[in-house]
Image (tube, grey):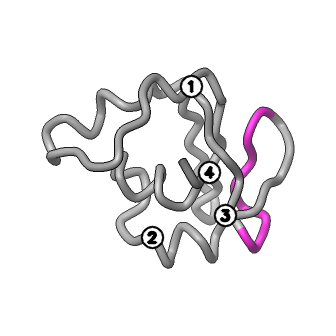
């Protein structure tokens, strides 16, 4: 699954276009390296997202094409 789509489906980022712009600007790292929005996300990847001064790290637990809002948090695990 593409990185921008995963970020939207998992609700880490609200819109896919915003996720794409963030990745293309280098504000998203996967396993310690900056990647483009077309990066193929795999289970076990660690995604780091920079929101201005705030950073979120999440480990990918599952990949799904669609999810309900209540189930979105099951796709990842937040890491400190």
In the rendered structure, does residue 74 fall within the stretch colored magenta?
Answer: no
Secondary-structure class at tag 4? strand
Residue at (43, 35) in percent of width and height: 63
User: What's the CA distance linking mark 3 and mark 2?
Assistant: 10 Å
Name the residue tied to disc 1.
43
Residue 64: % across, % down:
35, 39
Can you tell which mark lies on residue 16?
2
Q: Quadrant of residue 72?
A: top left
Name the residue tied to disc 4.
49
Q: Is residue 22 above or below residue 78?
A: below
The magenta segment: 24-31
Most extreme residue toward the right, as rendered?
Answer: 33
Work out whether mark 1 precedes mark 3 in sequence or the reverse, and give the earlier one. Answer: 3
Can you tell which mark lies on residue 37?
3
Can you tell which mark lies on residue 53?
none
How many residues crowd mark 3 within 10 Å: few (<14), some (14–19), many (20+)?
A: many
Secondary-structure class at tag 2? helix
In the rendered structure, does residue 29 fall within the stretch colored magenta?
Answer: yes
Q: Quadrant of residue 56?
A: top right
Residue at (68, 61) in percent of width and height: 38
Residues tagged 3 and 2 counted as in contact (Cβ below 8 A): no
Residue at (83, 53) in percent of width and height: 34
Q: Is residue 9 left or right of residue 55?
A: left
């Amino acid at each position: 699954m593409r990185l921008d789509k995963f970020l939207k489906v998992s609700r880490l980022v609200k819109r896919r276009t915003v996720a794409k712009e963030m990745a293309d600007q280098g504000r998203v790292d996967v396993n310690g390296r900056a990647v483009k929005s077309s990066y193929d996300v795999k289970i076990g990847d660690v995604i780091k997202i920079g929101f201005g001064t705030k950073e979120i790290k999440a480990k990918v637990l599952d990949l799904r094409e669609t999810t309900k809002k209540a189930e979105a948090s099951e796709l990842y695990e937040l890491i400190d």
